[in-house]
Image: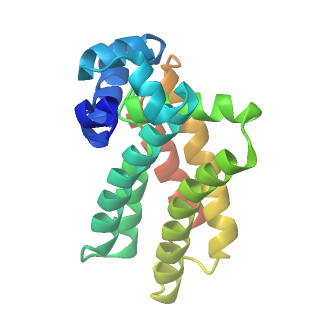
């Protein structure tokens, strides 16, 4: 077995360190050399495992999304009304604040996707698709229970996620007057008007 493989920390330790560095120092400070120092590897060894910074960022995003996906599944499976679970979904979606590490990472991956290959785009689409499918299922449940108006769940989910993305970007980049509470308030007003059964 090559020496690099024997001495390498577990993959999850590297991805955890990458996300911690993004949270504490910002994405611009996440270099292969700096990450290598954090986990006790050379930048060459990191490149051996991840091949490029783009791949490191994508794998970190996929790892982070896996954790969020498990949290989303737990929230959506809990007892309560569809409306309460929709509020929980929205709360999980919207960033915690300026420079939220998960959203900072998403913004960078989106930016780099302009030059990405089809395989990378497919990986991004898989992440987006999981959020979309869960929302469609929740909307369909709320409609069937009479909690929500009889909208097309797929179309409504696409529009709601676009709204959430827009507000979330404003929160994540720290746009003045666009904090998390303001975003949640706007989304809540939209849902009250457009979705909740009268």
Q: Nearer the viewer, residue 132 or 87?
A: 132
Tell me: residue 83, above or below residue 34. Answer: below
Image quarter of the N terminus: top left
Horizontal side of 78 relative to 170 (left or right) equals: left
Could you tell me residue 30's position as x and y percent? 42, 16
Could you tell me residue 53's position as x and y percent? 53, 25
Q: Nearer the viewer, residue 50 or 26?
A: 50
Residue at 34% over, 67% down: 73
Residue at 35% over, 16% down: 42
Horizontal side of 34 relative to 138 (left or right) equals: left
Q: Nearer the viewer, residue 2 or 77?
A: 2
State the residue lying farthest toward the bottom. 144
Residue at 61% over, 47% down: 163
Residue 178 visible in image: no
Residue at 27% over, 75% down: 80
Could you tell me residue 193's position as x and y percent? 57, 60
| Residue 34, quarter of the rendered image | top left
Horizontal side of 129 relative to 67 (left or right) equals: right
Tell me: residue 149, above or below residue 183. Answer: below
Residue 53 visible in image: yes
Could you tell me residue 8's position as x and y percent? 27, 32
Tell me: residue 33, above or below residue 127. Answer: above
| Residue 170, quarter of the rendered image | top right
């Amino acid at each position: 077995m090559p020496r690099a493989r024997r001495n390498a920390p577990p993959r999850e330790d590297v991805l955890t360190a990458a996300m911690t560095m993004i949270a504490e120092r910002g994405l611009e400070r996440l270099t292969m050399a700096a990450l290598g120092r954090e986990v006790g590897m050379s930048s060459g060894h990191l490149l051996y495992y991840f091949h490029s910074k783009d791949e490191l960022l994508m794998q970190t995003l996929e790892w982070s999304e896996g954790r969020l996906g498990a949290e989303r599944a737990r929230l959506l499976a809990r007892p309560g009304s569809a409306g309460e679970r929709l509020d929980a979904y929205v709360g999980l979606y919207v960033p915690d604040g300026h420079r939220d590490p998960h959203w900072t990472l998403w913004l960078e991956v989106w930016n780099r996707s302009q030059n990405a290959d089809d395989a990378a785009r497919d990986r991004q689409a898989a992440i987006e698709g999981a959020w979309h499918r869960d929302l469609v299922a929740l909307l369909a449940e709320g409609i069937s229970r009479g909690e929500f108006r009889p909208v097309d769940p797929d179309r409504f989910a696409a529009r709601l996620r676009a709204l959430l993305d827009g507000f979330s970007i404003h929160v994540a980049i720290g746009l003045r007057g666009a904090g998390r509470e303001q975003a949640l308030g706007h989304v809540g007003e939209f849902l009250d008007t457009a979705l909740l059964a009268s």
